[in-house]
Amino acid sequence: MRLLLEDRMNEVMTHIDAIMANASFNPFHYASEHSSRILSGEEEGVFAWIAANYLLGLFNNDQRQHSSYNHY
């Protein structure tokens, strides 16, 4: 989305807002128009880091399971 021209990006975001505001499609409360947004590259990187570490099981409290990742 960040690569799109601003006019096209706004069209897509308006369409997304309309779909998400439709209670028959989205059962969750959607606060108002323009509640959705495009993540910055930094935000996307943080979520990717969290996802990768979650999939590796590094958020588990059982440290014995992850002894190969412990370097301290």
Image (cartoon, rainbow, N blue to C red):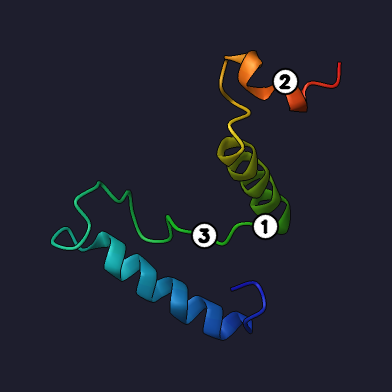
Nearer the observer, 45 or 22: 45
Quarter of image, res 56: top right
Bin the neighbour count of mark 2 within 10 Å (Cα to Cα): few under 14, some 14-19, many 20 and up: few
Residue located at (36% from left, 75% from top):
15
Q: Pointer 3: what residue?
A: 37
Q: CA distance from mark 3 to mark 2?
A: 39 Å
Q: Is residue 23 above or below residue 48?
A: below
Q: Pointer 1: what residue?
A: 40
Q: Position of residue 2 (x, y in %)?
A: 65, 72
Disc 3 residue type (three-letter): Arg
Residue located at (30% from left, 69% from top):
18
Residue located at (26% from left, 61% from top):
21
3 or 2: tag closer to the N-terminus: 3
For mark 2, give the secondary structure.
Answer: helix
For mark 1, give the secondary structure.
Answer: loop
Q: Pointer 2: what residue?
A: 67
In front: mark 2 or mark 1?
2
Nearer the observer, 41 or 53: 53
Disc 2 residue type (three-letter): Ser
10 lies left or right of 40: left
Quarter of image, res 4: bottom right
Quadrant of the rendering where the N terminus is positioned: bottom right
Q: Position of residue 60 (x, y in %)?
A: 56, 22
Nearer the observer, 19 or 49: 49
Bin the neighbour count of mark 1 within 10 Å (Cα to Cα): few under 14, some 14-19, many 20 and up: few
Q: Position of residue 6 (x, y in %)?
A: 61, 80
Task: Kindly indicate whether the residue at mark 2 contacts the one at mark 3 (C-beta within 8 angstroms).
Answer: no
